[in-house]
Image: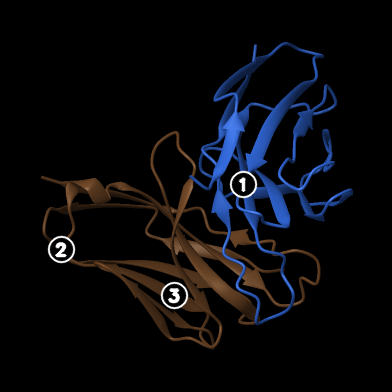
Chain colours: A blue, B brown
Amino acid sequence: DGGITQSPKYLFRKEGQNVTLSCEQNLNHDAMYWYRQDPGQGLRLIYYSQIVNDFQKGDIAEGYSVSREKKESFPLTVTSAQKNPTAFYLCASSRLAGGRRSYNEQFFGPGTRLTVL
Amino acid sequence: KQEVTQIPAALSVPEGENLVLNCSFTDSAIYNLQWFRQDPGKGLTSLLLIQSSQREQTSGRLNASLDKSSGRSTLYIAASQPGDSATYLCAVRPVGETSGSRLTFGEGTQLTVNP
């Protein structure tokens, strides 16, 4: 089955600890995204990547880091610099956007819930 | 800056009722608008995507319309069922985003369909 997988489903972090969330897709999509979802708020973009070895900051990148060494993988590291990391994290992918005629529907993974102890 | 608003924040209806969810956006310069469904604790499932040149899209009991000039979209659900209970989110892709396909999301409408 084609799709996006995220692991783990639940993650607990101690103060001062870095943790890495996994995101893998087998849809052959070029673009991948990380969003954060907090109760009562819409999704906010953390980082996105259009191509291997390249990525850009979204609206709330502080305290996070990413890498894109392979087309199918886009891991997110939540560093100790992120002061309020408890949230639901969603990974998404789409075909590369190439202008207004591009069909760039985004598909989402099942999410990872991160809790700070 | 593009802002997306969804009203109402929550809606409860009896089974079988037809209903409309609303989405408005402040900047009409968009490439497309996408409607999603989210079940509690789950990821988002794409329901419909409407390109800026389109007026509506249909999938089964769902119909989404787009009025770009007024900055509005509606999601119509016919003959609602308890299984339709979920949070529905809309998102727009603003024109001018030359990098990637970043979306701007509304906060969602939480729908409950009572048997």
Distance, label 2 to label 1, CA atoms, is 35 Å
Task: Name the subunit of mark 3.
Answer: B
Eye-nearest disc, 2 or 1: 1
Three-letter amino acid code at the position of disc 3 = Ser
Q: Which residue is mark 2?
A: B79
Three-letter amino acid code at the position of disc 1 = Asn
Tell me the element at label 2. loop
Coordinates of residue A3 in the picture (x, y in percent): 54, 46
Asked if badge 2 and badge 3 are on a common chain, one would say yes
Asked if badge 2 and badge 1 are on a common chain, one would say no
The residue under the point 73% across, 78% down is A99
Tell me the element at label 3. strand
The residue under the point 48% across, 86% down is B54
Q: Which residue is mark 1?
A: A26
Along the line of sight, which residue is nearer the eye, B5 or A76? A76
The residue under the point 67% across, 56% down is A29
Eye-nearest disc, 1 or 3: 1
Relative placement, left or right, of B38 versus B91 is: left
